[in-house]
Amino acid sequence: MADKILKKLYIEVWRQNNAKAKGKFETYTIENISTGTSFLEMLDILNNDLIEKGVDPIAFDHDCREGICGTCSLYINGRPHGPDSAVTTCQLHMRKFKDGDTITIEPWRAKAFPVIKDLVVNRSAFEQILQAGGFVSVNTGGVPDGNAILISHEDAEESMDAASCIGCGACVAACKNSSAMLFVSAKVSHLAKLPQGKVEAKARARNMVAKMDELGFGGCTNTQACEAECPKSISISNIARLNREYLSARFSE
Amino acid sequence: MSKFLYASIGRKFLMSVTGIFLLLFILVHLTINLLLIFDDSGALYNEGAHFMVTNPAIKIMEPILALGFLVHIIWSLLISWENYKARPVKYKKQDLSVASSWASRNMLILGALVFVFLVIHLANFWWKIKVSGHDLLNQGLEPGADMHNTYLLVSTLFKTSWFYSLLYILGGVLLGLHVTHGFWSAFQTIGFSNKVWLNRLQTVAKVYAVVVALGFAIIPLYFMIKF
Ligand code: HEM
Ligand code: SF4
Ligand code: FES
């Protein structure tokens, strides 16, 4: 399918100079964008225009631009990572939009993710949650003989699925409660499913949930929005597992 | 322990346990109520109602039920407030409908409407039966019968008032919507779910919700249509 040209688009974007400043929406127009352009390339083109006009370019996060690092964010037209499903913003293309569209771009909104500048938010809260327990600290010995510790195919698969979380924060952005439960459950699950992770499973669930609460994320009310908007389609069955791990840890105190 | 009941998952645990308790209560309540439409003499329903006010087990359950409601409601407000605070700056444009069900996003509103209904419902029946008394309760009984004619009180309301009949139908529908999400959510919250069980629980939730909504709605409808 040949790429079409979108003659004119209206880009409504959140501008905020720094963490303390009061932000506001600005609308820019951009012309002649090919539908084959990626969303971030469209922003690059817009930023070139802005620089030529002497306007401060729009700050937004990006790194790998191939859907693996989780750095890109952006709440586009009311949805994290925009109107496509199971993709990151860097994997979103302009063919998802129509000529003449107004595209509203906002930063992730959550108390625990404060805006640094424009569309860039501080996601170090995720780092802090990981530091509270998202690791294995027991000595698991040298490289084990391949068949010494047997792990069922299902367990390995579930662990790998959970481990595919890239820590982008779309789950928090999508959730009406700004809850980080999908992220935390993925990080708890990928370890809980493996023998090396089982040793510290209880403390891990407790500490990571406590940190999540402390940082000001909301609680889970099982709306399933996180799973639907997650670029890696992390399942909410991980949240059920986290609830199980956490409750059994609390009740066995 | 107090810290547990205030932590995010602890709070939800309490919602879930009280919610499941209420789900069970609703089933018992509906079963007894359906006696209303299976015997137009009212004898069957009056027996049921008499059993409910005299049976010691039920007497013990009554304050526990009130407590269940109270905890469920107070914690629902607590949860909703905490979750509201977690996003101080709201989105300008938000499209939640693609990713989550309407009921799941409106549990507080649905619950609050169920609560309004509950207050009216208690004033209609519970208050008259337990506290103030009512003429209809003592009419049309066998001489010397040691019970209330609860059937007469209930059926008269539905036969004579379109407003209350419609209100009770609405009450059933609102409760049904609340539990389409609440039912499976309660199990997810206590960890009883996985990829396979999620679908099963969501199906059972729909069945439960339809049974409850239709079951409660059919009673006023029966009296409106038949009499
Ligand atoms: C007989 C009546 C009721 C039944 C059977 C019922 C049942 C349930 C169930 C099973 C849940 C799920 C708990 C969970 O997700 O863990 C729930 C959640 C909830 N209920 Fe009720 N409930 C009733 C009345 C009420 C009332 C009167 C309110 C008051 C305002 C209320 C407010 C809520 C709220 C806000 C939630 C959402 C919690 C969440 O989404 O995480 N409910 N209810
Ligand atoms: S669970 Fe999904 S949406 Fe949430 S941080 Fe991980 S990859 Fe992103
Ligand atoms: S920039 Fe790496 S996932 Fe989008």
Image (cartoon, grey):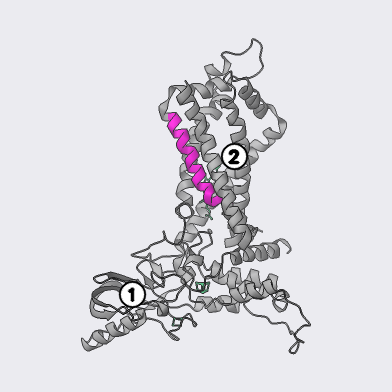
Q: Is the distance from the Cβ of mark 2 to the nearest ligand 1 atom less than 8 Å?
A: yes
Chain letter behind tag 2:
B
Chain letter, disc 1 residue: A
Task: Give the magenta-colored segment's residue range.
Answer: B164-183
Mark 1, Cα crowd under 10 Å, few <14 / some 14-19 / many 20+, is some
**Mark 2, residue position:** B26
Can you give x and y, in whole percent of width and height, for residue B107 in the image?
48, 51
Q: Is residue A114 above or below residue B190?
A: below
Q: Residue at x 56, y 40 (%)?
A: B211
Hey, which quadrant is residue A160 in on the image?
Answer: bottom right
Q: Is residue A27 left or right of residue B137?
A: left
Disc 2 residue type (three-letter): Ile
Q: Residue at x 22, y 87 (%)?
A: A54
| Residue topped by disc 1 | A95
Query: Residue A60 in magenta?
Result: no
**The C terminus of chain A sits in image quarter:** bottom right
Percent position (x, y) of residue B100?
A: 46, 59
